[in-house]
Image (cartoon, grey):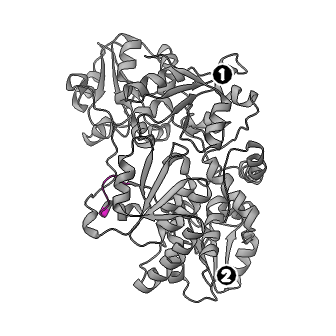
Amino acid sequence: MSALKTITVQQVRQSLLEKIEIALIDLREEALFAMAHPLFAVNMPLGRIEADAWVRIPRLDAPIVLLDDGQKLTQRAALALQQLGYSDIGLLETQPNVDGEPSGIAAWEAAGGELFQDVNVPSKAFGELVESVRHTPSLSAQEVQALQQAQSNMVVLDVRRFDEYNTMNIPGGINVPGAELVLRARTIAPDPATHIVVNCAGRTRSIIGTQSLVNAGIPNKVTALRNGTIGWTLAGQALEHGAKQRFGEVSDAMALEAASRAQAVAKRAGVKTISAQTLLAYQAESSRTTYCLDVRTPQEYESAHLPGFWSAPGGQLVQETDFHAAVRGARIVLFDTDGVRANMSASWLAQMGWDVVVLEPQPGSALTQKGPPAYPAPSLPSPAQCVDANTLHLWLSQASPRTLVLDFSPSANYVKSHIPGAWFVLRSDLARALRNLPAADRYVLTDSCTRLARHALPEVSTLTGKPTYLLEGSTPAWQKAGFPSDSGESHLASPRIDRYRRPYEGTDAPAQAMQAYLDWEFGLVAQLGRDGTHGFRVI
């Protein structure tokens, strides 16, 4: 591995202030990342680098700065990135952390940098700033329930993903994911006297959704449900579960009206529309990172989409911008087929400091690709390093030689279903985990999605010195072959820190955790002021 340069905290801050491209990559598992990180650090755990890097950092010479909190992940990550072809890699300067280990997080704090908790913080902090500047109208859970009980002329629109809405929702709510609001709200509530209440699980998406409708100038009264389903639950009010009410079709006349409103908002935010020729010129530039994102629903994307565009439904794009665009300072090109969703999403990204444009309408014949995104990924190991499910089943039935299965699935997937006797392992924790596992004569690696275990194979082979194989088709192939599966936390070789449990997801979060989350959100505007690198503006 070639020598790596050290990047100072001040150099990172200067790039952010000058909007020079930089990918500040925090290599820790998500639960650790959520404890404390710089505002524009993006979480890319060590074990996901090969699976995610080419999509999240598409330009191979984009400036990358790596950090952790003393877990000694940066050198391993730099090697993996170099093997993928990345050429401009630096390590954030370090200070000793509480354990005495060199830590980029400690260096950031020592240099006066602000540290943020939770995930998707740039979007959440921006949402709080929007509310503080625009005084986005809202009602408490008790007020909304009182309106419902009085049978007021009101409709509740839930702007989350359908799976979140289906898990728990405000009684009677209709699922209209964020970017769909301006396109579809007038169809759902054609009577201008109908009061529209917008909700999410917490605060951000309801604030942005409500303010989207306000910015677009729809004639209805619009208010956010203050604190979303969290606020509803803390008020002691019952949620529904398993709801399936979704938005319907929009007439041509309503779509044209919505497009006019959205284009006016985008113009106010300084968003430009580009031609297909300009897009080709952007994509040919070697000195800029360009993200091409289709903000329509996943179903529309899969039915037909433009080559080179990834699916990023607009509401989630605004909510999770750090995931979809890991290079701060990059250019973003948005596309839809109606002139509404891309313009509204772009209006928010522009206010968040992104260089964002909208691709002009394209003929249907240009949407030549079908199916889910075909994300680029490194090649599989050679067939000699793979075994099928039947062979693995035979090996596991034999006492000798001893076979150990290592499962690199996300821990939630592992707990749900895994091969009997398989051990859950995090790649970032691999060396320690292997030292504590039973002795084995050979190892077989698997996962739930066929994209993670393959990259750990060389490391397991090197660390153990034993024959190491990849299960063909991963755990789904085992299940398809009809072999039994286990569930639960039966064999955890690594702790379940790969996923931060959001206080607003699921139905069993403690009330204390939900209230603490809201209190944290209320403090984000002050944190933005102390940080000073955000570059946000609110129109």
In the picture, which quadrant includes the N terminus?
A: top left
Among numbered discs 2 and 1, the one appearing first in the sequence: 1
In the image, residue 15 sits, relative to residue 263, either above or below, namely above
Q: Which of 275/312 is in front?
A: 275
Q: Residue furthest top?
A: 465
What amino acid is found at the position of numbered circle 2 in the picture?
A: Lys
Q: Could you tell me residue 2's position as x and y percent?
A: 44, 17
Span shown in magenta = 303-309
Q: Amino acid at mark 1?
A: Thr
The quarter holding residue 455 reads: top left
Label 2, on which residue?
221
Q: Which residue corresponds to the image point at 72% horizontal and 63% vertical from the top-left?
A: 131
The residue lying toward the viewer, choosing from 474 and 81, is 81
Q: Residues within 10 Å of mark 2 (few under 14, many from 20)?
A: some
In the rendered image, residue 465 lying in the magenta stretch gets the answer no
Q: Identify the main secondary structure in magenta.
A: loop
Pointer 1 residue: 94
**Residue 109 left/right relative to 45:** right
